[in-house]
Image (tube, helix red, strand yellow):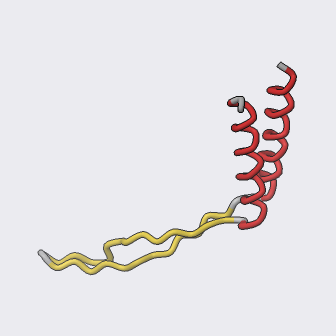
Amino acid sequence: MKASVIVGVLLIVLGAAALVYKGFSFTTEETVAQIGPLKATAEVENDVAIPNVLGIVAIIAGVLVIAVGARK
C-alpha cells in the first residue's frame, strides 16, 4: 500500500470521528491552596470542542490525497 493511500484513509477516519464525537474532554489536577507543606488540589474537567468544518475538511483532504496518490 502506498503511503499516500494510508495518509488519505487516516484523514478520512479522523474526519469521520471528529464529526461523530464533536469533541473530547480530559481531567487535570490543579493546586487550589498551598500552606507550607500542605497542598489542596482539585480535579478540573476540560472540554475541547472540534468544529464540524474541521471534520469535513479532513475528509475532503483525505479523498484528495488518495486521488492524487492514485494518479501517480
Q: Quadrant of the C terminus?
A: top right
Q: Residue at x 84, y 27 (%)?
A: 70
Is 12 drawn above or below residue 50 in the view shown? above
Tally of marks: 0
Q: Residue at x 67, y 64 (%)?
A: 49
| Residue 64 in picture, x, y percent from top left | 84, 34
Q: Is residue 24 left or right of residue 66?
A: left
Q: Residue at x 32, y 77 (%)?
A: 32
* Residue at the left extreme of this rendering: 37
Q: Quadrant of the N terminus?
A: top right
Is 19 drawn above or below residue 15 in the view shown? below
Q: Residue at x 83, y 51 (%)?
A: 56
Q: Quadrant of residue 18?
A: bottom right
Is 34 drawn above or below residue 65 in the view shown? below
Camera-side residue of 34 and 30: 30
* Residue at the top extreme of this rendering: 72
| Residue 44 in picture, x, y percent from top left | 45, 75
| Residue 21 in picture, x, y percent from top left | 71, 67
Camera-side residue of 20 and 7: 7
| Residue 17 in picture, x, y percent from top left | 73, 59
Q: Quadrant of residue 35?
A: bottom left
